[in-house]
Image (cartoon, helix red, strand yellow):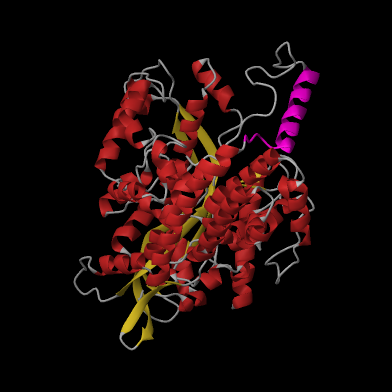
Amino acid sequence: MDAYSQDKANPFHKEYGWHQSSIKIRLPKEGTKWPSETNTPELKIPRVYHRSIVDIIESIFMENVATTFNMIPYRKYWQCSPDRSIEVFSEACSSPEMLETYDKINALPCEAGDEYECAIASLMFWFNATHLANFGDASLWPFYLYFRNQSKYVQGKPTTSACHHVAYIPTLPDDLQDQHMKIFGKPSSSEVYTHCKCELMQAIWALLLDKKFMHAYEHGIVIKCSDGVTRRIFPRFFTHLADYPEKVILSGIKSLGQCPCAPCLMKKSEVHLMGTKRDMKRRIKCMQKDDRKHHREVEDAWTLIFQLGVPVDGSHVKNILNDESLVPTWNLFLEKLCPHGFNRFQMFVVDKLHKFELGVWKATFTHLMRILHAAGGHAIQKLNERYQDVPTFGRGTIRKFNTNASAMKHLAAQDFEDLLQCTIPVFEALLLKDHNTMVLDLLFDLATWHMIAKFRLHTKDTLNFFDTTTVFLGQTIHKFVQTTCAHYHTTELPHKYTSYGQWEASLASKHLDLDPTGHSKGVASGLKYKKLNLNTYKYHALRDYPNTIRQFGTTDSFSTQPGELQHRHVKCWYPKTPKGKKNTVSRMTQIETREQLLGKIVKA
């Protein structure tokens, strides 16, 4: 089967052919000058496995599955009364973003005699690193592709093979420091390591956005689709789903920098104002736009770093880039797609799973546990007992809670979602009357916001209500911080302190990094004071959900959940691969090719 899949004469080779390439990253060094950046030493990273995006598009649109694709976007309305109709938002193919893009490609100039119907290959990318085993450091950084022409109800099922593996992103070499020592005589700094990581991501995109793809982006691909109609297909980027660390690497901004949000230029000091009128005005005024100004700023930063030997994080570089929290990395989207009117910052849409369930709600629930510990008594024990008494509901809708829910051990996003859905009766009367009312109001607003964000179908009326709910949630959280949070002196949770104590004991046994009192150097002993932090990007992003739904469709159309489910496949493949980092990814590409081939045979 492997020999057959590699044979260029078979009909499956072009569609599922993996390519092995190597990439090079330029290494900066503080105080070292070169005539130009082309003369700088390079770090070579071999064995980068990737596929052609154009080949994937051609194969998918010629398969039978393309008959279920929406080639022509549309608007959906609900005739709620004889004299009133309301626009409905649900599938991505009926979103304003898809309609606007469809109008743009049909407005492009055509060659004489070209009468092909124009259609969009709506691309939704997803990538996030995952552990492959329970023990050890084996991990994989897969790059997935979904077509938004397909219904979200089909994409949500792992068995439909709606996910296409585009690349497996390598990590920086383990011997990076050794290579840096060999070249410069000194190890690299953490800032240089971060810079190389950003350059690695852009080098991967340089392989994907090759000449073949750029020609297809400008002129389209003529494909005879499975329904017998020959169309000119234009690939277009719509959304890119990733958690915050991966998002900042791809967008080219600093992680938790002065402007931590990719779509807007809100300052970090203003992030906590979510829900206020001032916040809304600033968002509209400070929308991030891709232009040649960014290109010039990065070019100036590279001149300083490579030709003048300025540190990557030096003050001269910061003076150029810090206003918009940019990093000195060439961005392929800016270089190749910006001239065609593409704005890379707008494709980074919100993500309910990482931003709310594992972000805002997890942080809020954690702080509520701190408050219950600070209140004393048997509040924590009562909370655990009440969660244990909650019965299961539905088929995996509400699962049986752990005996110690307050410890939050080994919880996934769905577990935090269950905690939120059952939280109001559990927290009732655990605090003093005034604070109890405040906490219940907060939990009600959080549960209401989460419920509306999960709607699989929205109308203009529900989105207006969503706007109001988001404002109320922001006001309630600020009131909670000013009253209940200010009343209690909250510290880190006991199990966190215990784990920290075990770490100190481990250092003591090795006689490492301890002061004369027996504590780690530079860290005070005892429980640390903790407060609810609102200066986070995940809290700031809550206000973007209603507008994102208006533009791209409901949140289940661009959820990260299908990508998380796809991780199960690569984890199942890992035991079938030879142990060793050099051959693991290569073997996985073979297994992926086999599965695609067998699936095609079964469907034939």
Q: What's the residue at 46%, 31% (across, down)?
A: 195
x, y percent for residue 45 = 53, 36
Residue 509 part of the magenta segment: yes
Q: Is residue 302 above or below residue 167?
A: above
Residues rendered magenta in the picture: 489-510
Q: Using residue 365 as the reference point, say whether residue 473 is left or right of it.
A: left
Residue 437 part of the magenta segment: no
**Of 89 and 332, which appears nearest the observer?**
89
The N terminus is located in which quarter?
A: bottom right
The C terminus is located in which quarter?
A: bottom right
x, y percent for residue 500 = 72, 30
Q: What's the residue at 30%, 66% (across, down)?
A: 100
Q: Is residue 565 above or below residue 37?
A: below
Q: Main secondary structure of the magenta part?
A: helix
- The answer to whether residue 58 is seen in the rendering is yes
**Of 205 and 72, which appears nearest the observer?**
72
x, y percent for residue 49 = 54, 48
Q: What's the residue at 66%, 48% (across, down)?
A: 431
Residue 462 sits in quarter: bottom left
- The answer to whether residue 560 is seen in the rendering is no
Q: How many marks are shown on the rendered structure?
A: 0
Residue 595 sits in quarter: bottom right
